[in-house]
Image: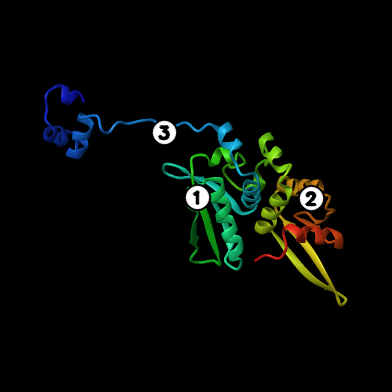
Amino acid sequence: MAMVRDGLNDCEISRRTLLPRTTVRDWRHGSRQRTAPPRIDAEILRASLPAKSYCYLLGLYLGDGYVSKEARTWKLRVTLDTAYPGIIDECGAAMEAVFPGKHAHIWARTKANCVDVSTCSNAWPLLLPQHGPGRKHERQIVLEGWQERLLEGCNEEFVRGLIHSDGCRVVANDRGVRSVRYHFSNASTDILSLYCGALDALGIPWTHPSKRDIAVYRKAATRRMDEFVGPKR
């Protein structure tokens, strides 16, 4: 703009700055102005969240998700097994429900039987404040107050997301008797505690058979789990 004030024409300014002449022209006439990106209001954003979709997505993220910084935005990526296309679809639908108008992208990995389901938004660090460098079990994972309030009415969706990421439903044969069991495994003691807390809130008894595993095996408890989790699809 200083060159414009000095009387240089668009072609000369383009030669000196290496900018396209059309860009110089637009800036001269004020049709292209640089503006700061709009500030995201975290309170408004969180207040508008669809609680069930968010809590399901939170469970998936804590199991197999990762938030990363891209060139101009942030990306949430959840890695899922191609053997369960229903879970892949449900994950994508949850992402799109959290951010209406955004499309969830599914990328197949070339050397593994899994896909990455992802969406980009500058709001992901605000919605998933548990993100950070390194592995989840090597850092503290604590929910914020607003997340705990959302979970109060959506523990079923949260548990469903955790099972769909790092859990399984097993049908065993105990001396000829069909027996259903649920297992959830994670290296993070904090995430295990969140899972157990959600089960406690739902009145579902659990056991801790190993350092990384939480099991639900009582008949009444597995019938209750089948009401909102069931076999992986």
Q: Quadrant of the C terminus?
A: bottom right
**Does residue 82 appear left or right of residue 178 in this picture?**
left
Residue 227, how many percent across, how many down?
A: 76, 59
Name the colour scheme: rainbow
Q: Can residue 77 be seen in the rendering of this structure?
A: yes
Q: Residue at x 86, y 60 (%)?
A: 220
* C-alpha distance separating marks 2 and 3: 41 Å
Disc 1 designates what residue?
Answer: 119
Disc 2 designates what residue?
Answer: 199
Q: Can residue 142 be seen in the rendering of this structure?
A: no
Residue 101, how many percent across, how many down?
A: 48, 48
| Amino acid residing under circle 3 | Pro
* Above-or-below relation of 47 to 54: above
Q: Residue at x 69, y 51 (%)?
A: 157
Disc 3 designates what residue?
Answer: 37
Q: Quadrant of the N terminus?
A: top left
State the image quarter where residue 71 is shown: top left
| Amino acid residing under circle 2 | Leu
Residue 69, how many percent across, how many down?
A: 48, 43
How crowded pointer 2 is (Cα within 10 Å; few <14, some 14-19, many 20+) is rated as many
